[in-house]
Amino acid sequence: MNTRPTEPDSDNYSLLLNKIDRTNRLPTLENKIIHVYAIRFIIVTIPNYCSHCGTELYTRQIEGRERAYCTHCEKAVYRNAKPCAGTIIVDDSEVLLVERTNPPDVGSWSLPAGFLELEEPPAEAAARELTEETGLSVSADGLRLFDTNLVSHPDDTHVLVIIYQTTRAATTGTVTAGSDAADARFWKIDELLACHESIETGYESILRKAISMS
């Protein structure tokens, strides 16, 4: 985990860099171990820097939260959830799911979804991700807003998923797993769980609601 100090502390860092410089000239196993440790130390303890001016960021309590702060720009550096969009397709009592190959919940099943491209409207992103992950195509105009879900990743990234819904009849193509999915198919939720498969955390109730409303 990245640590942002409240006061600069460069003594240990400087000593470590000097040791790296000396050990790089003598490539023994011990020196390689020191070098690896130093790299890990630097990654963990070097603070973040302001993307506008390059000044080291420190932590302050702002608006009831602990936030990164640039003393040069005199501004807080806000962190925001990344926007994603996905599509739920219900066919009778079955829902189209993909088997995840990326964190979080690798190996679980979820709706086809992904990050928005720059300047890409959410509905168009949802339609694009549907095609990329399942082989099915749908017009963005044929999607209706259904729900949202806030997902937390292990690396402390937070993603806001904008979920659209459509029917199988509104799509064209054959279900085929894309490069971002290990598999893609229609499932009955209870059958999926009876097969000891899992649903990505936070989505089971959303999927069941979509099926009940279809």
Image (tube, rainbow, N blue to C red):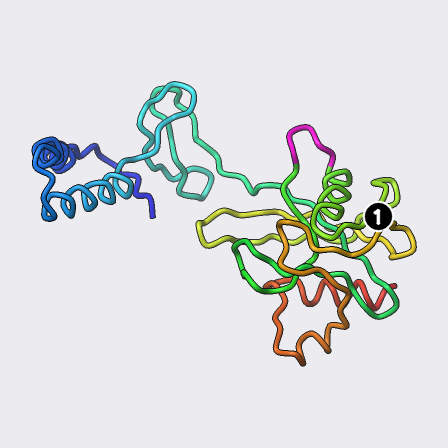
Q: Residue furthest right?
A: 169
Expressed as whole percent of the image width and height from the top left, the position of residue 140 reads 83, 40
Q: Quadrant of residue 196?
A: bottom right
Q: Quadrant of residue 201?
A: bottom right
Q: Residue at x 35, y 28 (%)?
A: 49
| Residue receiving disc 1 | 144
Q: Residue at x 87, y 57 (%)?
A: 168
Q: Give the main secondary structure, helix, strand or loop, of the magenta stretch.
A: loop
Q: Nearer the viewer, residue 171 or 177?
A: 177
Tell me the quadrant of the picture where the C terminus can be found.
bottom right
User: For the residue marked with disc 1, what is the amino acid?
Assistant: Arg
Q: Nearer the viewer, residue 91 or 31?
A: 31
Q: Is residue 26 above or below residue 191?
A: above
**Relative to 8, 30 lies left or right:** left
**Relative to 102, 9 lies left or right:** left
Q: Nearer the viewer, residue 65 or 38?
A: 38
Report the number of numbered marks.
1
**Relative to 123, 34 lies left or right:** left
Q: Quadrant of residue 39?
A: top left
Q: Residue at x 63, y 55 (%)?
A: 181
Expressed as whole percent of the image width and height from the top left, the position of residue 182 reads 62, 59
Expressed as whole percent of the image width and height from the top left, the position of residue 15 reads 9, 35
Q: For numbered disc 1, what is the local secondary structure?
A: strand
Q: Is residue 201 above or below residue 83?
A: below
Dot 1 alpha-carbon crowd within 10 angstroms: few under 14, some 14 to 19, many 20 or more: some
Expressed as whole percent of the image width and height from the top left, the position of residue 192 reads 69, 74
In the image, which residues are magenta? Answer: 117-121
Q: Is residue 191 above or below residue 162?
A: below
Q: Residue at x 73, y 77 (%)?
A: 190
**Relative to 15, 172 lies left or right:** right
Q: Is residue 165 above or below residue 45?
A: below
